[in-house]
Image (spheres, rainbow, N blue to C red):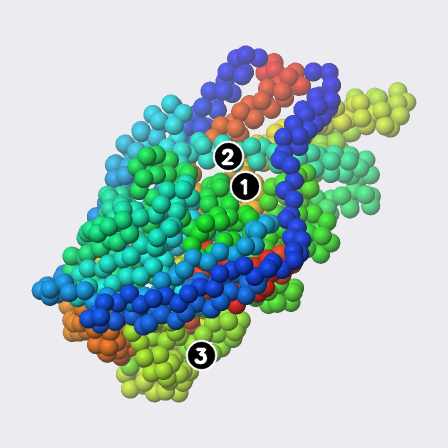
Amino acid sequence: MRYPKLAVALFLGAITLAAMSCGPAATPTPTLAPTPTPAPTATPTVPPAPTATPTATPILPTPTPTPTLKPGEPPKPTPTPTPTSPPVPTATPQPIATPTATPTARPIPTATATPTQVAVRPKGELKQAIQSFGHQHFDPVREERGNSSHYQAPIYDSLIGSNVDTGQMAPGIAERWEFLSDGLTWRFYVRKGMKWHNGDPVTANDVAFSMERFKEKGAIAGGDIRQYQVKSNVIDEYTVELKTNVVYTYFGSTMSRSVGDQGTIMPKKYIEAVGADKFAQEPVGNGPWKFKKSVSGVMVQFDAWDQHWLARPNYELYTLVLIPEESTRMAALRTGALGIAMIEPDSISETRSSGMRLITNRGTMQSTYYIWGTYDPRYKDGPLANVKVREALSLAINRPEIVKYVMEGEGAIPLPYGVFRYSLDIDLAKWEKWSQQAMGYDPARAKQLMAEAGYPNGFKLCYYNLALPGTSFQIRVGEATAGYWKAAGIDVDLRAIEWGLFSPMRREHDASSGAQKVLSGCISNMRSAGRPTTLTRSHDALTFTGSERVAGSPETMTAEAKEIDRLYKAAFAAIDPQERARKTDAALEYMNSLWLIAPVVEGANFWAVNPKLVGEFKGIPGRGELADISPLIPRPDQKAWK
Amino acid sequence: MQRYIMRRALQGVVTLFAVTLFIFFFGRLIGNPLDLMLPDDATPEEFQHATEALGLDKPIHQQLYMFYVAALRGDLGRSVRYNRPVTQIFMERFPNTLRLAPVSMAIAFALAIPLGVLAAFFRGRLPDRLATLGAVLGMAIPHFWLGIVLIYLFAVTWDLLPPSGMGGPSHYVLPAATIGTGYAAGLMRLLRSSMLEVMGSDYVRTARSKGLKNSTVLLRHTMRNAVIPVFTLAGVLLAHAIAGALVTETVFAWPGVGRLTYEAVINRDYPLLQGVVMIAAIFVLVINLGVDVLYAYIDPRIRYT
């Protein structure tokens, strides 16, 4: 080679030119030109007609009418009765009761939401960045709720929807539903006139088909449907009954998007025609957005669909992009490359100072701690087995400071574990009062309790500090908690651990005691997701049949575990709403008295919004994602949706 | 020459085998993907079913054998997370990395060659010290930090360039500059050392004594020989860039192979991790082999040893 320099230069130059020439064209940032406010064309929605039979005992409150839409205003979801469905038990293998009641209908009058259409032509692109995608499956049975809600909820409706004002239940595919007096059967009335994105009608057969899909071997979502062996009975084209194998008073909640994704309804005819694999690649739903394309780990895109029963999107295109790095998301938002970005509390001050708008979805989680294996023979005489010490640990935490400094003032002092301000079957005033007292900061009382328990000079405590996926601020909550405990004289051995390594430790049980092999005798961060079902999360954690077994195990049946089992079963089996509320209260009181689990802070999900690209809107209580309100999010030239 | 190529190719096959073996066993130390895939309240039966469905219930040596047999057929399995063929996902991302890598290399060379030559030519003087300081900074500053600083300066503060993602030519500037400056530092230091070594050699002294101009000596006699080790390093860096600049691609949300590798690790997606590392290793080996061949072609001493 006579001219090595030339060869090198030519080689690199050729590659560079080739690469540049095959790069994609620039993606223009959507410019949202202001449009004149359209004439008022929205049809006022009519208050739903009661559908209860005369002899029925209404369980759900009477619906209130939907407010009339104003010109240019995006439609609000039809106000709903807030069905006081009880929590969904998720880990009670034994039948709670053997129902013998004659299945006399006890219809639940629910709102009949009238489809509302807005005559505003969708335009522009709503571009939203999130920090983590799930598996990016579009077949609802193949992925559990979590990040999947970001990209599945825009496409699919649930059998029961979510009230975006309260965080509770609302009509969805079912415009109303009834809980029959046998305690097993739920009758759903499918809204007429709905269509799948391919034009097929949505019918009761789709509901029954979806339940069967969730029961298929290999399904990941739909655990309750499998556990309670839900059977479907199609009464007619728009009526379907779903029956559980045991009394399952919270089945309605399970079918709501407020609780999970098990109520997601899929198109029978389409899936049978194309098969599950193609359905997953080219999903067809009946939500306000039609699937357009997906690039694994990069983005998902949707087109507006103008035939949704509730609302037509204000934007023509909805793009979800994955930007893992927080600083990059904020930068992209500030430069106008994004309209909305998911943020952590760390970025709240930057959001405010840079003129971006902060949206807080309140009550999406509680950051808590569990005290593991207090019944384990190795630790049953240790400090954590003493309830006074456990209460002292909670009193030593300065929660208002954590809310102020870790959560930038956007968190809240928590209610009991797994209970939120939108929870069902609770006396909110009572638990607010409890929260003020029990969740207060009282280091003197904490010291006194430790002294009474025989630990005036503290003790050594191992503490696993971790964050569950999507709430990395739990690490800082944990650090602050450890700091307060150290200040109370406790020698804290703080162990940072990643969730993926920690999670299986919960399931590694000692053969003789049934307690966690490694975790027993320690404390760790945990989390309760925001759900309106009051007792489900604490039941999962405390019951001896679950994987967490905080109060006892099948091998070590403590008195506490027996009492929890009794109280929770009684609450789950109470069909009468008032009786259920009383029993829920009793279960909560007992759980709180144990101090085995204590919430530290009620967290939220945060979104930063570029006001030049996106109009004003509010967050959804209890729901981290924005998918359900995505069609209602206004453009900057439209009236705020609040 | 053919024997040399054959020998290097065989070494490459052995290296590839070692790399895949390593990633197969050590990749499993990051944990069980089912812990992230299944819901918290999944039953033992659901765990068992998912384990069987993924083939994770089989003995590890059997899994390894199946992996190699399938790989020889061009099948690298399905991603646990995305439930799609690994090769399909890789090929979605690979072109994006392939576009970024040469731009990064071009920036690296554009910085390294003039600075290296200047530093050598003005050895011990101000240009040398400035260039050396720049090189030290380039090597010391983490890509992660540099990327964020560049985003805030050029995208947020001055609004000159897009902050992230793929798009037109302007989207390439910041990520390529982040990668390129790091590479340039190493290349510049090597070029400077190599230049100084060559400048002290007899034939350069001879050239000078013949009365040749400085520029002629520098470009025709010094650079030509000094660039050989630089060329080798450039090959390694190019291979590195093509295998995926993990940190930079993550910071700039660049949908390339580096970010895919990052996702495979955090999601414990064994098949995806194995597949990505294997394909990336093949590219690295091929590029290195190509560089070695060119190197031998450029330097006859290598050819005849």
Q: Position of residue A426 (x, y in %)?
A: 31, 76
Q: How many callouts does the rendering have?
A: 3
Where in the figure is residue A567, as x and y percent of width and height?
19, 73
Q: Nearer the viewer, mark 3 or mark 2?
A: 2
Which quadrant is home to the C terminus of chain B? top right
Look at the numbered disc 2 and give the secondary structure of its residue.
Answer: helix
Q: Secondary structure at mark 1?
A: loop
Residue B255: image tag? 1
For image coordinates 59% across by 50% down, the residue present is A123
Q: Amino acid at mark 2?
A: Glu
In primary-sequence order, the first of circles 1 and 2 is: 2
Against B118, residue A314 (above or below) is below
- Tell me the distance, in whole angstroms, between the alpha carbons under discs 3 and 2: 50 Å
The reply to the same-chain question for discs 1 and 2 is yes
The residue nearer to you, when weighing B272 against A314, is A314
Q: Residue most toward the right?
A: B211
Label 1 amino acid? Pro
Horizontal arrangement in the rendering, residue A515 relative to residue A455 (left or right): left
Which dot, 1 or 3, sits closer to the camera? 1
Is B275 positioned to the left or the right of B180 in the image? left
Q: Residue at x 25, y 36 (%)?
A: B59
